Image (tube, rainbow, N blue to C red):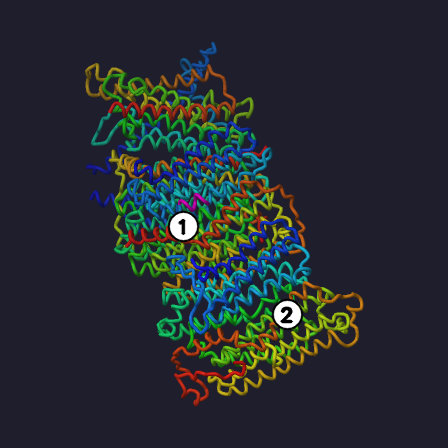
Amino acid sequence: MHLSDFQLFVLITIIKIAVVLVITLTAVAYTVLLERKVIGRIQNRWGPSRVGPFGLLQPLADGIKLFLKEDLMPMSVERPLFVAAPVIALACALVSVAVVPFGATFKIQGVDIFQVSNVNIGLLVILGITSIGVYGIALSGWSSNNKYSLMGSLRASSQVISYELALGLSLVGVVLRAGSLNLRDIVNSQIGHGFLSWNFFGGLQFVGFFIYIMAAYAETNRAPFDLPEAESELVAGYHTEYSSMKFAMFFMAEYANMLTVSCVATLLFFGGASSPFEGWLPAFGPAWLQAVLPIFWFVAKVFAFLFLYIWVRATLPRFRYDQLMSFGWKFLLPLAMANILATSLIMALRS
Amino acid sequence: MSSALLSILPEVVLTVTGVLIMLIDPFFAPTASKKALGWLAVLGTLGAAGATLLQLRSHQILVTFSGSIQMDTFSVFFHLLIASIVLLTLLVSLDYFKPGVTSHSGEYFALVLFGSVGMMLMTCSVELLMVFIGLEISSISTYILAGYRKGQATASESSLKYFLLGSFATAFFLYGIALAFGATGTTSLTGIASGLSITAFPTMAFLALAMMLVGLGFKVSAAPFHVWTPDVYQGAPAPVVGLMSTAPKAAVFAVLLRITATTYSSELLHARWVLLIGIIAVLSMTIGNLGALLQKDAKRMLAYSSIAHAGYLMVAYTALPADSIAAAAFYTAGYAAMNVGAFAVISQLGGYDEPLRTIDDYRGLAQKHPVLAAALAFFLLSLVGIPFTGGFFGKFYVFNAAIGAGHVWLAVLGLLNSGVACFYYLRLLTALYSRQLGEEGGEFEGSSPAAVIAIAGAVLATLLLGVLPGKVLGLAQRGATVQVSRNR
Amino acid sequence: MVPISYYLVLAAILFSLGIAAYLVKRNVITIFISIELMLNAVNLTFIAFAHQWNKLNGQIFVFFVMVVAAAEAAVGLAIIIALFRSRQTLNVDQVNLLKG
Amino acid sequence: MNELVDTIMHLALFLIFGGLAVLAALNLLLQRHPINSALSLVVVMMSLAVLYWSLGAEFLAAAQIIVYSGAVMVLFVFVIMLLNAGEEERTKGSKIASIAGFPGAVAIFCLLSFVFLSEGHKLGLSHLGGSLDEATSNISQISSLLFTDLLLPFEVTSILILVAILGAVVLAKKER
Amino acid sequence: MTIDSSILSLIVFFPTVGAILLALLPANPTLQKWGALVVTLLTFLFTLHLPAHYQYGLSGYQFEVNVPWIASPAIRYHLGVDGLSMWLVVLSGFLAPLGVLISWRAIDRREKLFYTLFLLQQTAMIGVFVALDLFLYYGFWEWSLVPMAILIATFGRTDKRAKAALKYFLYAFIPSAILLVGMLWVYAQTGTFDLPMLQQMAASHSISSNQTALWLASLAFLVAFAVKVPVFPLHGWLSDAIFEAPTAAVMVLAGKLGLYSILRFSFGIFPEQSRQIAPLMIALGAIGIAYGALVALVQKDLKRLAAYSTLGHLSFITLGIFSFTVAGIDGGVYQIINHGISGGALFMLLGALYERYGTYDMRELGGVAQKLPWMVTLFVITALSNIGLPGLNGFVGEFLTLSGSLQTIYVAHPMIWTAIATTGVIFSAGYMLWAVQRIFYGGMGRRPDEVSGWDLDAREQVALWPMAVLFVVMGVASPYWMRAIDSFGAGFINQPVVLNLRIADPHSATNLPGIPVSGTEGGAR
């Protein structure tokens, strides 16, 4: 059977989507396990260890449990929105993975294999989708018709909106250096002298990185910025009324977002799928190894960031709400602007 | 000085002052008297006026910022006008806020300055993008200023109505720009002017102009787009009404003049445009005056009067090119002087809480405040169009231009209208000089010296524009020649 | 290959729906929302024309419209909040203290 | 062959997302709860973003999503939640408004589409702008235009934003 | 700058300067009164310069000032007087101090406002008479309304004063708006507002070739003036305004301005159209005379009676000037001055009566002749002057007017209209004398019973006797005034005018275009 270019393209793309989706969901599930394990160790306990070897099957058990639980629907909720909210949240969290290049450029039949879609405004797509994700949070709280949920979602949305600014601005330095919004181009701009040409080191974007990482933690409503679900104040925040699969979707969305954040951090500041010794060590091994090795580096970096996430959660206390807001507006935002200014000045001087 | 800087020097001065005010503001206690900031704003405005004079002295036409700004006599004329209006408004509002009670009085001055930056930019832009941004700056700041007395139940309502209808108008204006862009492939007014005569889409071009007219008509409260005016003027603080009934309108009229100038290249388009404007002018005059006849609230009445005046002004647009521009520009100036003055007096008589509402409340005020009443009477007479006032000469000049272009019917309708108009102005005037006193006496806090200066300035301006209009007229006519020669 | 005029008509539909909503709706927030719809329709028109003329000016105009819309939204919603604080209603028919 | 695919895809995109936009706009009109109207508008905006992209304005498509649906509309939803706005009541005013509103809107629609369709043949065809993969981007062109020719509007916009911030603070802050 | 070229500016603006000074002075009643008196007297003195240095026998304008004011539209500051306006200026100057004197006691509060407005009004009025630029003229014309309206609104007698003021203003203002259209149209055609230039153009028929437009423009002018006169049936504002207005204001309220404007501008710019409309105006004049007299006959209120008598007089003048004969126009102009003095004196006396008894109602008055001998003397003289008794001023004017109207060629049967007018004169004698009888003789009225009046005091004597003397002097020595007036009238009638009239009388039509120039008829010469 002979496939036309277009048909081939559609086919490969569908396969890519399926594979990436499965991998992401699995990764999400195991991030949960990782978190429980790491926090357990940090708190001097074991963490889940009963299901499967080293508790490795725990995510499966959790999934089955959540799936089989009764799906409660409180009486006074706004039904359509109540149902739509977790879907929006999860969908937005998963879609952004689509533009992430998780390997080196490797084409089969003219189609890039290690990236679902190479969009020329990839970074903007990620930002856009992240900003859409707020709806999931906002609507869940509002449609629950519960004051704690509402408070949680109000907090979450204002937090997300506020930190989105700092987040976006922190990336401008990187974009300035790369001169493109295409993620692949950004990664390629950090290749040459191993890890020294990564934006974090060579690009002097460490300030940008720190702003990014802090803003991103707030964006994902993770500790120390997990005010929206501050259980001591708001029960469980915006997903108080959710149960079963709907709750699971929020849960997955949160971890998928963590994953995205880590991917973006890797791509923008740490050279993406490039090895830290790129340009210093000659390419070695067969072609398949050359194709797969970058994926290894990518996964390793992402893993490091996920670990950082968990580490931070286990060690840092929660902010107060007004502290959170003033931190974002009065510290991160000006700092991000200063970073842009400094970066552009340096670039202007260099050229 | 670089020509680019020179061409936007007044705006720069105002912006810098505004930012400065915002920077200094936090050093005051929230409810402290922010009079010092007010004086700073006054200084800034004077600086802007000085910068404008500098522009005038350079005697040249500067096109800067890749053709988006055009500094010429026309823009300088409106710059000066806006600066004067803002100056008077600032002086009137210096003592308007009660220290210790009202907060955010520092931001008020900054907003006024920023708003005037927008207005000024509108008058010197020949790029619709710039015009749009200027329009929005001025609109947004006036939306805010309209709702400034948060304690009053009517303030937010006034602000809301202004906002909703203003944004609605913006959408139309934008659609007009989009269609103009579609018809000519450019958003620069000079480009549109040359494109309109050769466009392949004549209907679309006309529709574009009509849509822009709708949008701008809203902003200048021309009928039938006037519905917001009475409510907004009634609820907004009096000094702000003085500002927003003149300065943004002046700016919009300037834009409208530049848009009118684009139609000169096409005979057919110009004829249609004139017809459209003529209809709107007649509607505005009639609806404004008839509406005003029915009002009991003084500010509301003046709101309808401003609709009518927008109508008179639009009559000018139907005249021959050079005449129409000069006449409209001059009328704007005359109208600004008297209207700002009238609202300055009203704000002085009423103070922050404005207890004087209905016309009956104004009864016998001439006995208590003879000078203020005389000033108000003078402004009212100017609004009526009694000779030797700016209002009269403006009207005279406008109708002269219209008749010069052969639109005698417009002049007849317009002047009959002004005859009807004198009825309601005189109602307020006779109330002022009535022997009985109104019931709502209103505690009079004593007029502030700054406001008295402002009122005196407005009286002087109104008088000078009526008696010795030569200088202003000359400027307006020079501005007109610039426009006509560039767009032919 | 879709004729540009299709896009323009689509924009016209959206614009008219915006006008209809503006006139019919009674909740101030919804009225404001319909203004945003109108602005979006205008943006589509701009972009369609920008495509037609192959000029970027139209696209840049849209960019500025977006910025302005954002600023307008901030102010507009602040006004609405201020209104709600003083009047406890969002229905335009009940916002009627000002009349002659 | 490729051109045909292109045409079909483009038409399909236009029909799907244009239709979606119209349906959502209709929904905006017919829904009575403000939050539903707001969400309908979000759908409109996102469909329009796709159409922008199909017209070669991918930067604006992204900006549309980030600025409009991601920030502006979130603000709307936020305020609706904050004020706990309920469904709107049918009042006398709304009846009068619908009598005046619908014909007015229809009239404007007829006028506009008449003009577009009658002069439409002089307008060209649109080509699917952003191609499917690794397209050249016009962002650099946009930005160079923005920072050279249109620098002044760009800078002046900051005043606009400043005014908006000032206004929001002044109006929304509670009076002590 | 010689005195002759600046005297008119001085006369016009001196009262304004006075008004400003008064406004700045403290609101002390005595100070204000004396200040106003001094200003008006000085103004009067200045006006006397005009007849003293007028060069009689010359047609055209004298004491001219003509400097550019505004470049575009071409507006000039152009003042000047001729035989017509010179005496009107003097008359205005003469009446003003009398007005101040008569208000001495009648205005007992807010004197500052009163005298300030009064002086402003004087500027406006004199300005109307001397302005030779249409724009300038229009300015003064409109301004004359404002102080008057405020005077009526503030110092009116009853609660309806505001309404009367409004009525007065609207009546005058709306036609003025149309007048402005007419003026602007004329400007659009000719490019000038300068009256002498326009007159020349009118003479050479170069204003416009569009007859319809010319007609409409002339109507615009005429209607505005006719309302101000007022000509029957446009007199709706008159009786209310006179009824409410304080005496000093009433004295200058009606007549002069409108009639002068007709003579100067309607006749000057639209000579043909004015002649074409003459039949209508003559008819209206005649009807107005009869109507005024008849309505006056049934009035109970003295002020209303005087108001309708005023209407009668003014209609008389209208009749005269629209006859377009030298006698008619001379008589009309003379009658304008007469009316200013006689009518003024009548209103002053009525005002003095009101001060004493607080009413204008004839039924409440009566039999005060013994108490007020000086008053009755002056009243009778004034009444006789108003009636037009031979030997007094009124007779000269009425005689000339009637002889002019008899000769007119613009109506088919001038006899009929003259007859109607004459009946009016007879009726006016009737109501005047009847009023005298009812006020001063007969049984004691209710008010005089309650209030003890007092006779004219020195101030009032000073104010009234000059007038009484003038009645006689102007009746006997009319040529002194006529010299100047005739130079205007003759110069005016001598204009070559081409008429394409459709006049009912075919015999008159054959006389056209030459207009018979009347030589020396008029007994008072």
How far apart marks 1 and 2 lie (CA) works out to 67 Å
Is residue E328 visible in this depiction of the protein?
A: yes
Which residue ends up furthest to the bottom in the rendered image? Answer: E507
Which chain is home to disc 1? B
Residue at image location 41% in from the left, 87% down from the top: E511
> Left or right of E478: which side holds E383?
right
The secondary structure type at the circle numbered 1 is helix
Left or right: B1 in relation to B379: left
Residue E316 found in image quarter: bottom right
Task: Assign a secondary structure to mark 2.
Answer: helix
Residue E181, position as x, y percentages in the image: 44, 66
Location of residue C64 in the rendering, given as x and y in whole percent from the top left corner: 36, 40
Q: Which residue is mark 2?
A: E345
Give neighbour class at mark 2: few <14, some 14-19, many 20+ (Cα, 10 Å): many
Q: Nearer the viewer, mark 1 or mark 2?
A: 2
Q: Main secondary structure of the magenta part?
A: helix
Does B211 lie within the magenta span?
no
Q: How many marks?
A: 2
**Residue ranking furthest to the front:** E52
The amino acid on which the numbered mark 1 sits, given as a three-letter code, is Phe
For the residue carrying disc 1, how many other residues have a C-alpha within 10 Å: few (<14), some (14-19), or many (20+)?
many
Please give the name of the residue rendered at 77% of the width and 77% of the height, measured from the top-left corner: E442
Name the residue located 42 percent from the left edge and 73 percent from the top edge: E270
The magenta segment: B79-84
A344 or B331, nearer to the observer? B331
Q: Amino acid at mark 2?
A: Ala
- Check if mark 1 and mark 2 are on a common chain: no
Which residue was labeled with disc 1? B172
Compared to residue A145, the image places residue D126 above or below, namely below
* For residue A301, above or below residue B38: above
